[in-house]
Image: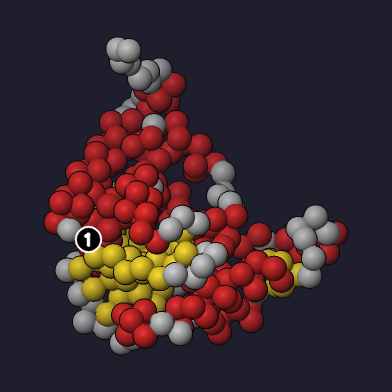
Amino acid sequence: MITLLNGEEWNEQDILAKMDDDSFYYGHLGKNALSSSALKKLLESPKAYQASLRMSDNSQALRDGQLVHLSILEKHKLKDLVIIEGTKARKEYKEAVAQYGERNVFTESEVNNAYWIADAVHQNQEAMYLLSDCDYEVPGVAMIEGIAHRAKADAITKDRKVIIDIKTTSSKVDDFKWAAKNFNYALQASLYLKIFNAEEFIFLVVQKDTKDIGIFTCSDQFLDYGAMDVLAGIQAYKNFFLQPNSEELIKNNVVRGIL
């Protein structure tokens, strides 16, 4: 049984089936289950997590990521998007967003950029071998330390042992190890392995400009760091959001240090 943050109780198979609906996954579950992005916000501060619940993140990086994932893994879904010529400043773009929502409206330029990144992956034998015999965009849910957590694996092998996560980078592929540290990808890897009960997590990385490709496996040390951060994020949620005086605790939280 999965108990959401708002107290709703779901049979695991029922909620997994519902998670294929993006509006449910990103909307309802975005507020009522933790995720890797939520845990990162909690590690940043309780106020950062609280603010993330009120605002939808539609940054260019996330938009590009959405298109790249679709172009590589689920190309057939691109036909469901509204593609507008020109820039986001055009009246036609704004009207389309008002009618269909930001997650469903893109410029032709955004789509073309995603196409060339996807094309580099499709032409790379090692990348395609890695993604072969996989299921794509697989939802997962689990109770961890008594708290509901959600995830979607970009690709997971049919035996459910290996998860492949696609990342794009503006830096050299060789520098991905620094991006992994800066964006705390260890937390994501550790959380996903736990949610899906998988054995290995692999990052498939594409450089946005050169289209160079990197494949990075995760060391035990990397995953151990991620596991500690997962627990720290959950504890932060319990300390600030499961208390009867939650609002007061968040409002009066102070970071102390000596310089």
For residue 77, above or below residue 248: below
Q: From where the camera sits, is residue 33 visible?
A: no
Left or right? Give the position of 13 relative to 107. Answer: left
Instruction: Return the x and y of residue 174 as percentages of the image width and height.
Output: 36, 59
Residue 137: x and y, percent? 41, 73
Q: Nearer the viewer, residue 146 or 37?
A: 37
Image quarter (top left, top right, bottom left or bottom right) of the C terminus: top left
Residue projecting furthest to the top: 258
**Which residue is at a point 61% across and 62% down the rendered structure image?**
103
Question: Where does the image place residue 19, in percent across and percent down from the top left?
Answer: 42, 68
- Colour convention of the picture: secondary structure
Q: Position of residue 214 (x, y in %)?
A: 36, 68
Left or right: residue 102 versus residue 39 is right
- Identify the amino acid type marked 1: Cys
Viewport quadrant of the N terminus: bottom left
Seen from the viewer's position, the closer of residues 214 and 54 is 214
Return the residue at label 1. Answer: 218
Q: What residue do we see at 85% from left, 59% from top?
A: 91
> In the picture, residue 127 is in which quadrant?
bottom left
Is residue 206 visible in the rendered image? The answer is yes
- From the viewer's side, name the closer residue of 220 and 26: 220
Residue that sits furthest to the left in the current view: 220
